[in-house]
Image (cartoon, rainbow, N blue to C red):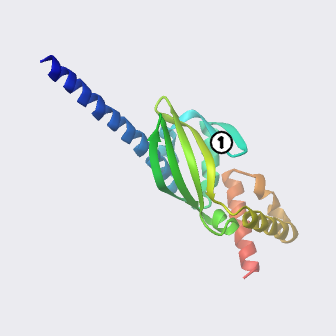
Amino acid sequence: MQKSIILLFFITTIVFSCKQRNSKIEFVKKYYETLNNSDFSNVTSLLSDSILSKEVNYKMMFSQEDYLKLLKWDSTFSPEYRVIEISEEDEIIRTKISQKDKRILFLNEEPIITNQIIRFNNGKISNIEIVKYVVFNDSIFISNRFKLLNWVGINHPEIKDFINDQTEKGGLKYIKAIELYQEANK
């Protein structure tokens, strides 16, 4: 009888651990799905009250409200996130993410692929860290950004401030700048 109870406890623990692991993985997949759909009403249920965003040489703490503003900026470019790889390791989720959108395809000329670590606090995403750029062509990106900024500064100075405006309004100006540049440089 005692062996049966121990065995039942062991099996329950394994099943519960697997379910928790899968639920975090599914949670992260849902996060990227909400980004693809620009589903801001559902993304808030996935995010902690504050979100730490880290990249190689960049670190910024956002309130949920400010992070949503950034996501709305991102959504103006019609992003497509694709989870290439995903795994759980020591309470964190490791992912390989492909991201493409109008801005990225213009600047980088191909999707950007990153390795990311996602951490949770109280069951919600609290930290999204890009730990490595797997596909990112720095020289093409910088060259295309320079050409765009230079051309807009000369030909459309009324929208030149788009580059540092990470709001929805700034994103719309960014799209307009890309469209005007592409039309003039066919």
The answer to whether 125 appears left or right of 106 in the picture is left
Assign a secondary structure to mark 1: strand
From what the image shows, is residue 157 above or below residue 96? Answer: below
Quarter where residue 148 is shown: bottom right
Q: Residue furthest front?
A: 3
Q: Residue furthest top?
A: 2
- Can the viewer see residue 79 in this picture? no
The answer to whether 66 appears left or right of 142 in the picture is left
Residue placed under numbered mark 1 in the picture: 54
The answer to whether 134 appears left or right of 173 in the picture is left
- Residue 82 is situated, as x and y percent measured from the top left of the image, at 49, 58
In this view, the residue in front, 171 or 23, is 23
- Residue 94 is situated, as x and y percent measured from the top left of the image, at 51, 45
* Residue at x 48%, y 39% (from the top left corner): 46
State the quadrant of the N terminus.
top left
* Residue at x 48%, y 55% (from the top left corner): 83
Quarter where residue 108 is shown: bottom right
**Crowd rating for badge 1 (residues with CA inside 10 Å; few <14, some 14–19, many 20+):** some
* Residue at x 77%, y 63% (from the top left corner): 142
Q: Residue furthest bottom?
A: 186
Q: Amino acid at mark 1?
A: Lys
Quarter where residue 74 is shown: bottom right
From what the image shows, is residue 109 above or below residue 134? Answer: below
In this view, the residue in front, 46 or 9, is 9
- Residue 54 is situated, as x and y percent measured from the top left of the image, at 65, 42
- Residue 136 is situated, as x and y percent measured from the top left of the image, at 66, 60
